[in-house]
Image (tube, rainbow, N blue to C red):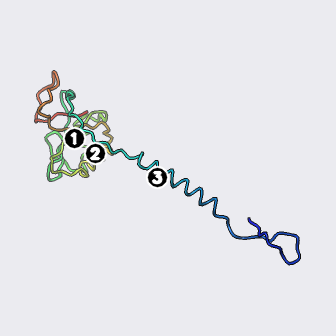
């Protein structure tokens, strides 16, 4: 609340001024603006880095891995049997004997979109299978894992 310093018509009281003093507000806003102008360039990372290729050995594959394959037409195959998305949980339970701790290796064709792979992984999670491995092709320079059984397809499992 402010007051006018002019004389009133016979009162010794100061007259009340209902205007807001915005000078401190403007000072605070300008200080904040300067802080953000200095901090904004520091918060972005713009460093060009040429990352090296991984030379890590592929993880050892279990004796009998459980593969869930997503075909280009978005049909699902558990092991060697085609299943519907609605019966995926029952098919996985039949393959694993109800062991929800079994790792399921998901492989998808290149033309399958990321969103479709995520939908399939959500189906796995809803069925209670939380240990999921993604399968990809081996790079030519990577050495095979020691004592790994021969894969049924030219793919390796990622942990």
Would you place residue 74 above or below residue 101 in this image?
Answer: below
Q: In this figure, which residue is indicated by the disc labeled 2? A: 121
Task: Assess whether mark 3 and mark 2 are in contact (beta carbons under 8 angstroms).
Answer: no
Q: Position of residue 82 (x, y in %)?
A: 15, 46
- As drawn, the label of residue 37 is 3
The Cα–Cα distance between marks 1 and 2, rounded to whole angstroms, is 8 Å
Would you place residue 59 above or below residue 118 in this image?
Answer: above
Which comes sooner in the sequence, label 2 or label 3?
3
The Cα–Cα distance between marks 2 and 3, rounded to whole angstroms, is 42 Å
Determine the residue positioned at 17% across, 43% down.
69
Q: Secondary structure at mark 2?
A: helix
Task: Assess whether mark 1 and mark 3 are in contact (beta carbons under 8 angstroms).
Answer: no
Q: Position of residue 146 (x, y in %)?
A: 16, 22
- For the residues carrying marks 2 and 3, which lies nearer the camera in this image? 3
Q: Is residue 35 left or right of residue 127?
A: right
Would you place residue 62 above or below residue 112 in this image?
Answer: above
Task: Assess whether mark 2 and mark 1 are in contact (beta carbons under 8 angstroms).
Answer: yes
Q: 105 or 9, which lies in front?
A: 9
Which comes sooner in the sequence, label 3 or label 1?
3
Residue at the outermost top position: 147
Q: Secondary structure at mark 3?
A: helix
The Cα–Cα distance between marks 3 and 1, rounded to whole angstroms, is 46 Å
């Amino acid at each position: 609340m402010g007051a006018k310093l002019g004389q009133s018509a016979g009162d010794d009281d100061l007259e009340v001024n209902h205007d807001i003093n915005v000078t401190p507000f403007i000072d605070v806003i300008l200080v904040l603006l300067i802080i953000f102008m200095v901090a904004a360039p520091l918060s972005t990372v713009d460093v060009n880095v040429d990352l090296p290729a991984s030379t890590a050995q592929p993880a050892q594959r279990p004796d009998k891995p459980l593969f869930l394959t997503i075909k280009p037409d978005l049909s699902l195959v558990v092991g060697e049997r085609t299943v519907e998305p609605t019966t995926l949980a029952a098919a996985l339970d039949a393959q694993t004997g109800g062991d929800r701790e079994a790792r399921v290796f998901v492989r998808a064709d290149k033309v399958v979109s990321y969103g479709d792979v995520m939908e399939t992984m959500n189906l796995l999670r809803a069925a209670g299978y939380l240990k999921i491995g993604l399968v990809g092709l081996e790079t030519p320079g990577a050495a095979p894992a020691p004592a790994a059984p021969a894969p049924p397809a030219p793919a390796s499992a990622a942990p």
